[in-house]
Image (tube, rainbow, N blue to C red):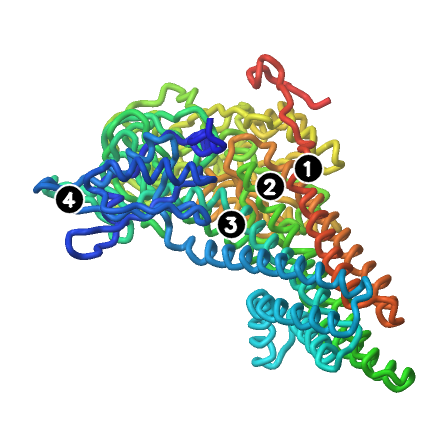
Amino acid sequence: MSCCAPGTEGSLELGEPLNPPSSEELLLASRDLGQGLRQTDLSVPGVYCGACITTIETALGRLGQVERARVNLSSKRVAVVWKEEVNGVRTDPADIARAILATGYRIHLFASGQDASYALRSQLIRAVALCGFASANIMLLSVSVWSGADAATRDMFHWISAMIAAPALIYGGRFFYQSAWNALKHGRTNMDVPIALAITLSYAVSLWETIHHGEHAWFDATVSLLFFLLIGRTLDHIMRDKARSAIAGLARLSPRGATVIDADGVRDYRPLADIEPGMSIAIAAGDRVAVDAVVVCGSSDLDMSIVNGESAPRRVVAGDSLQAGTLNLTGSLVARVTASAKDSFLSEVIGLMEAAEGGRARYRRIADRAASYYSPVVHLLALVTFLGWGIFGGDWKQAMLIAIAVLIITCPCALGLAVPVVQVVAAGRLFRRGIMVKEGSAMERLSEIDTVLFDKTGTLTVGKPRLVETADVKPAIMAIAAGLAAHSRHPLSKALHAAYNGALPAYEAVREIPGSGVEAETEAGTYRLGNRRFACPDETRINNGDARSEVVLSLDGRHLASFGFEDNPRAGAIAALRSLSVRGLAQEIVSGDRAAAVSAMAQRLGIGNWRADLSPKDKAARCAALAGEGHRVLMVGDGINDAPALAAAHVSMAPATAADIGRQAADFVFMQEDLDAVPFAIETSQRAGNLIRQNFALAIGYNIIAVPIAIAGYATPMIAAIAMSTSSLIVVANALRLAGAADTILPQKEAKSGFTGEGAQLA
């Protein structure tokens, strides 16, 4: 068996079946080379050795249409040059993809945006390898010098070391030199300025000593310092790529285009950029949904794992919505596009991840500010040390060496890594559990909360209520209600609309009032569909005492019909709420539903505090009131009516099923149905905060100990290089503890009856 076990690693990622990209996608992604040749670049994540390269290149070489194929092991990329026609027969590029799949390796189209990241990683790895090789060889030469080599031999070894160190400094140090020069050119400093200064001065002093036949040179310290610094920078780059790898995988799986059906029924495969809302697209079995759409005709099962992490397929029929990135499993569908590719759900998720990495959290700002002050302080301290030792010690060469050691040992690399490394690791940990975070400051705020407010419908509950009571409503009245409900995204409205199969009346103007309902002006009068207070404001009987959720239809304030709905709590709701209680967090339900329905759900979940019949303004006011009492509130909601409260709270979360405005207002978005995302996000944020504070303590403590030692002259440039690099690696290793930490939020088994029994209480 090969060392790679072809296909075993990649084929299981995301539970993805081995479906090759379509011929149209491959053709769109290929480049015309002229003379009847095209080139297609494919990513092959499962290649790890020379045997993998041979296997793939041999398989492609057997195809008559393939001119040449080359596998790049570093970027895990295969470039295939193929003929457009062979013996007058048009080449199907899917044959190339199938040939690779037949060898057991999973493939996808290579995204051009990956080039820069792969190139930088390759450059850093090559620089690390070069500096490591140079450092090892200089160390070997230094051993001979330390062993007592005479003058001529010592000078020869020093010159050889100088010649080895020079290209290492140029090639490996360019990352720091470029950054430092860019900062100085714009009249500022950064952490790379003292690094560049230290390695330059160290090499210059060593070269001076070599020219003047000195006994000591510090080429080994210079190159070793650069070697350790490059290791830290490479690890940081790899970790950031690792944190983005999951979402990058989703992006790679997104189709390059879709089959558009025009008004004449002609089908044309077009790139994503040309697909606009309102177009009709065909989605065959085995194809991924390219953009957000609504099914017009057909039925099928969808694999939703890419979007929500659930393994069970979801059945879709005409009228159901489709999200970009989902996989059509069984039947053919025709759908109407509702959003362009850049506005699709998958693009929104990618945007959230990008925002998470670019966020400027409080700790990040503190670290950046400290680093900005740190750099000039380091330079001043090194200058004072140099002058002090030179004036009072009289040995300016020794003063220069001590100043160099101070520059090296006080480099604020550990301080600069203290926050971003933790945030990247934490964001990656949250994403693996299906939780998106917009910025690092959200995690900081989440770790500070003491109160959690929950919306009921769509948040504590599944948000898929079922119409169970119509009170003998006449078909004509039912049609009016369903027609109004069609204009709202509220879960109760959607359930009411789904329960009616007849023809719907048309309304010229329908207005939705968040937190209340919808109304339409007609010749017969003003129809209202929503809560009882909104639909029948003049009625004295606001609450009918029924625990079911209720929607009321009225005409000019006169009651026409009432509709009762039932909804079930989310999976894991009781376990999640119990976990929050154990953490000492107060819980409260804030809902726009009737008191009877909210009370029943609160009793069912064991939540003692609840408020009902709240408007969006009332929910926001409740957040403000708690904040005024000194509480820090987490608001968890999903609807348009929750948006003001989500924005007003100290920090907020929303499920992926939330309305667009709700997801935009929330700081966190969780993708899965299970409510344990809430305690898991809190736990991760608290751990991240602890690790950041630990990293600050490590970075500051290191400097408190190391700086006096360097100023006192007890640290050579070599010792300083090892000490500084070790501090950075300790900070990185401490941050990585979060990635390997075991989850304390474990799925807890509910009662065997699930949520079918009323009155379930928390212990």
Q: Looking at the picture, tell me which residue is in the foreground, 78 or 742.
A: 78
Whichever of labels 1 and 4 marks the residue nearer the N terminus, that label is 4
For residue 223, above or below residue 562? below
Residue ID at (74%, 82%): 212
For residue 178, above or below residue 237? below
Q: Residues within 10 Å of mark 3 (few under 14, many from 20)?
A: many
Marks 3/2 in contact by CB < 8 Å: the verdict is no
Residue position marked by numbered label 2 in the rendering = 429
Q: Looking at the picture, tell me which residue is in the foreground, 203 or 588.
A: 203
Marks 2/1 in contact by CB < 8 Å: the verdict is yes
Residue positioned most to the top? 752
User: Mark 1 is on which residue type?
Assistant: Ala
Percent position of residue 188, x then y: 63, 78
In the image, taking residue 96 as reference, residue 377 lies left or right, namely: right
In the image, taking residue 171 as reference, residue 343 lies left or right, namely: left
Q: Which mark is residue 741?
A: 1
Q: CA distance from mark 1 to mark 4?
A: 53 Å
Residue ID at (19%, 41%): 65
User: Mark 4 is on which residue type?
Assistant: Asp
Whichever of labels 3 and 4 marks the residue nearer the N terminus, that label is 4
Residue ID at (60%, 17%): 758
Residue position marked by numbered label 3 in the rendering = 353
Residue position marked by numbered label 4 in the rendering = 262
Q: Looking at the picture, tell me which residue is in the foreground, 269 or 750.
A: 269
Percent position of residue 619, x then y: 59, 45
In the image, taking residue 253 as reference, residue 276 lies left or right, namely: left
Q: Mark 1 vs mark 3: give the one in front.
A: 1
